[in-house]
Image (tube, coloured by chain):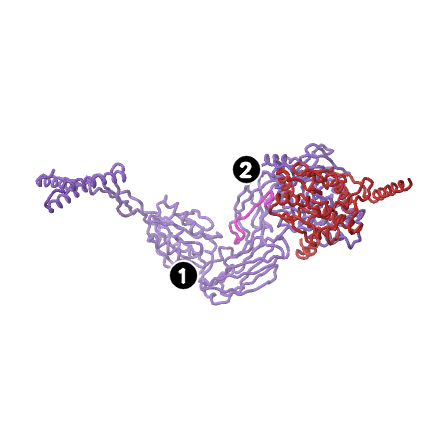
Amino acid sequence: MRAVFGVRWGRLWLVLVCLSVSPVQRVAAFGDATAVEIVSLDVGNGIKGARNVAERLAWEVRKRSSVEPILEPGRARLDKASLFRSPFVYWRGSDEFPPLSQQAIEGLRKYIHRGGFILIDDATAGGEGFDRAVRRELLRAFPALPLQPISSDHTIYRSFYLLRNPVGRVQGPAFLEGITYGDRIAIVYSRHDLGGAFQRDALGAWSQAVVPGGEPQRERAIRLGVNLVLYALCTDYKDDQVHAPFIMRRRGAGR
Amino acid sequence: MSDWQWQLGILGGDTTAWVLGLALLAFWFVELRSIRGESDPKRRVTLAALGGLGILAVYLLALQVTLVRETFEEVAGGTGIVLDNSRSMTLAGASGPRSDAVRALIREWQEDDRVNPVVYLFGSSTRGTLWNDLAETYEPVDDETRIRDALSYVLEKGADQELGSLVVITDGADASFRAEALGLDSAAPAIHAVVVGGDDPLDDQAIVSLHADPTAYVGVPAIIRAEVRSVGDLRRSELRVQLWHESRLEEETVAVLDETGRGTVAFEVTPKRPGRSLYRLLIPEASNDEVPQNNDRAALLRVGRERLRALLVAGRPGWDVRFLRDFLKRDGSVDLVSFFILRAAADLTAAPTNELALIPFPTDELFREHLGSFDVVIFQNFDYAPYEMQTYLPRIRDYVQRGGSFVMIGGDRSFAEGRYAGTAIEEILPVTLGAPGVLKGSYRAEVSKQLARHPIVALGPDPALTRKTWKALPALHGANIVSAVKPEARVLLHHPRARLRGGAPLPVLVVGEAGRGRVAAMTTDASWRWRFAADDTTVGSDEYELFWDRMIRWLTRDPLLEPARISTDRERYGVGAELAVSGRLRDESYRPLKKARVALHYQPAVDDVGDAVVDTDQDGQLQITLRAPGEPGAYEVVASVEGKEVAREVFIVEESGDELADLEAMPGQLQAVAEQTGGRVFLGTQDVPALAELASTSRRAAGLVSKEPLSSPWFIFLTVLLLGVTWVLRRRWGRR
């Protein structure tokens, strides 16, 4: 019974610690409509897990950076106007899914064209069903814009934390993939079960073990998640920082 | 039309002639067929020939051929004098000023009272004047020589006055004049030319024309190109050209001249500061240069930045920040420096600094060292207090008041929420802040009725369509509550329902001026929703970009977005030349200033030229001709309404201007005109005969002369004879 209580107390402490380090809950001053929201994409399955990841990612971003995402984000469908509630959509899946409706494909194109960002997260550890379906649908929506590996020197790896390579719950490939739309990466596809490293159970404990790197790998996965949110919000801002001194010198003082 | 031409009198014209001709030809073939049986070849040929000639004669009779010719007659015509009134006529040659020679010639002509010519003066324009006191009143002052315009005008007038001859008195210094451009025909009067100074070759080095990019950019090389020429004895001298800037000799070069004595020199200049920059090109004066005035000319460069420089500071990343930054980054005309606060003091990054891609906020570098280099500063949901920026706020205020621009965009860290009340920033904002407060909920911002033409919100071609467009835009969400709108500020967008304490609508976008700078307060952080909308039927993305593009351009005083603009017809004038000013004036709400009294004056002030006054028309347009200042230099013409300046335009006054730049007499084209019209050319005034000796008849149409040679009785008799002989011979030789 003590052991049982011990476990329960342990979990309770964890929750209390988390609460103590969480930033002061600031109510979005102008309401949720203009706040940063990591919306989960409902493509028919896996939405429950996606919402949990989106909440945890929002929480990590709020705790670690000045961004103040909504902590209880909503969900959206590609074929509904709800897709446009936020320019950041998190699409998590593990199973193959049937072809999207034409309306959903049109919604996907319009969403990206108008400035939206999608993080696609393959929750399997190397499974093929979801991967095959994702590639098929992205090819339908953007036949001229293939998924391509994202270089390790891309802004995504230095939008907040300095990272070298992508990791998630699993080691996965040594690169992320992405679709570049205009001068920004509009869709990022991770095959590392990034969200799996974020998930916690109802009492706040990590839901899944991270392999092979354990907790240091989990931290790196969380940092990658934060970087992806910051990239969606700032795009190549960090390149500006590099260029700023040069611009200053080139233009010279004036007026 | 001097030769005979024929016409057909037959009813139905060419068609009938063709039909009848074919019918008669067929009849002749029938006749030939009927004599096929004639055994005697001589008889057969005789009958065929006589028949053919008879039919031809009938055909010619039926055609009723008429010969027509237009005739002219010479009638006694008037004489016109077309006298050059441009400043180049004041130049002195070996025998004195050209204008003195002209006066002497006129006096000589006036002694002979047999001729009383009509007189036209020409230069910038052509107008009539009186003959009797011409010698006394002739004072050439015009700043242009337009021979073609003058002759076209006088020839058109002369058609009514039945002018028999025209005498053009000019120095011929109009390089653009071409004889063929006049389109002279045989009815033109005889045009004589007296080329004053044509017998006295000029010794002159000159900058004929000057070309510079109208707009240059700081740090970007611009080219000033000058066409130079050297005539007379000075052709043998070296032609040196100097570039001066701010009383400093920058560069000197020697022009390479072609066989006509002309050449081009080019100087590369790199402006260092924005604003207006005056450059002078100078040919050092030779002792025998007869026209030193045209050795010194000026070019005015309007120096801007190649690209606008914008500083965007955001209190934290958000969608409003992301969309605005993306827009500004895409805009090729903007150099964007942006700083976002990515991490606040309370944030727990769980990483040492060397694992973070963060740099300290370079407040001192931005707001002390480089602030003046920005064209616009944007505070987007940014609160200054956590970054110890109190000392920089007065600097930002001063920067704006000296001519910079500033916009604050809403959010929970802006306006009173950002604790700007009572700071130097509130001094420049177009609103007063009061206590912190925000308004939640969605709404569609409405355009203020009186300001629907303001370029920032004028999304449609007229106010009605603008209001309709704004109603169709995706809704906004939330707004900062401000205390009041400052008296001189203008509310462009307001909340449809919420009110300020005084009852006025809650402003969403307010613009105004602070010192010499411009400011805007946008109390919402949701304009990105115009760009990111689900509904295809609502307008949005284009309007978002148009709105922010206009906002930045208005703040940085893009001339195209100014409510009132005036312009001069040229950039350079000679001293005292005619200077045409036109423009369109609108009030600060961008409504036309109808029937407004506009005062125009020069800056720097000119003693001998007072204020000119002109009224605008129904559309706010104005047009007036002024006299350019008498001293060379760079000037501005300033337009004021009710004592308040509304627009200004810069121009240059030169000692020479274009009129004195290229003075070489060019009698060649006048010679061509004289040859075409039967006139004569005189180089100089020495050998010009009395006015009465120059032809004064005019040629006019005297009507048409016609004759019908085939309708004469002889031809009819011949026809009848042919037909009769044919008939008799046919009967005698046994034919019908």
In x, y percent, where is residue A203?
83, 40
Tell me which amino acid carries mark 1.
Asp
Q: Tell me the tag on residue B199.
A: 1
Which residues are the magenta region? B560-577
- Would you say residue B449 is visible in this rendering? no
State the SS at label 1: loop
Mark 2: few/some/many CA within 10 Å (<14, 14-19, 20+): few
Q: Chain of mark 1?
A: B
Q: Is residue B539 above or below residue A211?
A: above
In x, y percent, where is residue B562?
60, 44
Q: Chain of mark 2?
A: B
Q: Tell me the tag on residue B618.
A: 2
- Would you say residue B605 is visible in this rendering? yes
Considering every residue shown, the one lying at the far right of the view is A2
Tell me which amino acid carries mark 2.
Gln
Chain B colour is purple
Q: Are marks 2 and 1 in contact (CB under 8 Å)?
A: no
Instruction: Label the red chain with its letter.
Output: A
Q: Are marks 2 and 1 on the same chain?
A: yes
In x, y percent, where is residue B139?
46, 52
Q: Residue at x 10, y 41 (%)?
A: B729
Asked if residue B639 lies left or right of residue B388, the reply is left
Sequence order check: which comes first, mark 2 or mark 1? 1
The quarter of the picture where residue B588 lies is: top right
In x, y percent, where is residue B464?
59, 34
Q: Magenta segment: does it hold A4? A: no
Q: Nearer the viewer, residue A122 or B502?
A: A122
Q: Residue at x 57, y 40 (%)?
A: B597
Distance of label 2 from label 1 (alpha carbons): 54 Å
Quadrant in which the C terminus of chain B appears: top left
